Amino acid sequence: MAIADDAMGMVLGSLVIGKPLGIVAFAMMAGAFGFPRAVGLENRSMVVIGIAARIGFTVALCFTTAAFPVTSSYLDQAKMGARLSFLAAPLAIGLAKALKVGTAGASAD
């Protein structure tokens, strides 16, 4: 069974790929239409924000509970996909340090 064939893969894929890509793309599109970003909010900051936004626990669980019957095997798979989105937290912290974004990238004097 391919990962895209099950509910866990679909939920996790939408949180891991869709959310960060959408956030970065729409921020760039807003800039193209003349909407300025906050002072100091660079492209690398937007990437970290997109990664951190992967943590979609509450909304993803709400939608999976509403979308699948309680007796469905897909319900547990979809919930696991939402739970696995918490793996984005250490990734976002590591990326922030690597890209020197915010206080995670600041050096102590």
Image (cartoon, grey):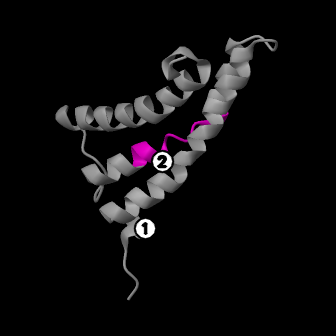
Q: Is residue 53 above or below residue 38?
A: above
Does the magenta run of residues contain 70? no
Q: What separation in Å lies between label 2 and label 1 (alpha carbons)?
A: 13 Å
Q: Bounds of the magenta span?
A: 49-59
SS class, disc 1: helix
| Residue 105: image location, x then y, percent | 37, 69
Q: Amino acid at mark 1?
A: Ala
- Give the vertical position of 94 relative to 3 (above or below): below
Main SS of residues in magenta:
helix
In the image, what residue type sits under mark 2? Ala
| Total count of labels | 2
Query: Residue at the spot x=28%, y=57% of the render?
Result: 39
Q: Is residue 108 left or right of residue 32?
A: right
Judged left or right of residue 38, residue 87 is: right
Q: Earlier in the sequence, mark 2 or mark 1?
A: 2
Task: Write down the quadrant of residue 95 in the picture.
Answer: bottom left
4 over 22 or under it: above or below:
above
Q: Nearer the viewer, residue 62 or 36?
A: 62
Identify the residue under disc 1: 104
Considering every residue shown, the one lying at the far front of the view is 1
x and y, in percent, of residue 45 in the image:
33, 53
Where residue 43 sits in the image (x, y, percent)? 26, 49
Where residue 52 is drawn, which disc sits there? 2
Residue in the picture at 43% in, 60% down: 94
- Examine the structure image and report whether residue 52 is included in the region drawn in magenta: yes
